[in-house]
Image (cartoon, grey):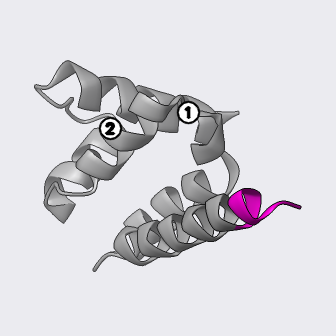
Amino acid sequence: MSTADGENEAAANARRSRLRWRCRRGMLELDLLLLGFLESGFHLLPDQGQRDFEALLEAPDPELLDWLMGRSIPEKKELADVVERIRAHLAA
């Protein structure tokens, strides 16, 4: 492994650790949904989708839970797309 590859891997691991921490919410349901997706589906998102997932984590817990449970959808299309990807991935 080259030095650049090692640095890229270290940066990716640091990002994943930060995201894992941000996925831990005040509600067990959200923890399970978000951490489950982070571990098994996040890497399947394109770069923009990954940035949109990070933006999604800025939402308050009640809104996020409503979106992920299908009770409402985000107004922003990019967030709605990520929510749909998460829901589809977890349903598979």
Query: How many residues crowd around disc 1 within 10 Å: few (fewer than 14), some, or many (20 or more)?
Result: some
Please give the residue where the numbered disc 1 appears in the rendered image: 45
What is the C-alpha distance between the residues marked 1 and 2? 10 Å
As drawn, is 89 to the left or to the right of 46?
Answer: right
As drawn, is 80 to the left or to the right of 7?
Answer: left
As drawn, is 64 to the left or to the right of 63?
Answer: right
Q: Residue furthest top?
A: 77
Quadrant position of the C terminus in the picture: top right
Q: Between residue 12 and residue 62, name the one nearer to us.
A: 12
Checking the image for residue 66, the label placed there is: none
Boundaries of the magenta span? 1-6
x%, y% of residue 80? 28, 26
Identity of the residue drawn at 55% across and 66% down: 11
Labelled pair 1, 2 in contact (Cβ < 8 Å): yes
- Mark 2: secondary structure: helix
x%, y% of residue 75? 10, 25
Q: Between residue 48 and residue 63, name the one nearer to us.
A: 48
Checking the image for residue 52, the label placed there is: 2
Quadrant position of the N terminus in the picture: bottom right
Identity of the residue drawn at 47% across and 58% down: 34
x%, y% of residue 63? 16, 50
Identity of the residue drawn at 32% across and 75% down: 25
Q: Looking at numbered disc 2 in the image, what kind of residue is underneath it?
A: Asp
- N-terminal of the pair, mark 1 or mark 2, is 1
Indicate whether residue 4 is drawn in magenta.
yes
Q: Tell me if I can see residue 43 in this picture.
A: yes
Identity of the residue drawn at 57% across and 45% down: 42
x%, y% of residue 17? 52, 75
Q: Between residue 33 and residue 51, name the one nearer to us.
A: 51
Q: Tell me if I can see residue 69 in this picture.
A: no
Question: Relative to 83, does residue 81 appear above or below in the rendering?
Answer: above
Q: Looking at numbered disc 1 in the image, what kind of residue is underneath it?
A: Leu
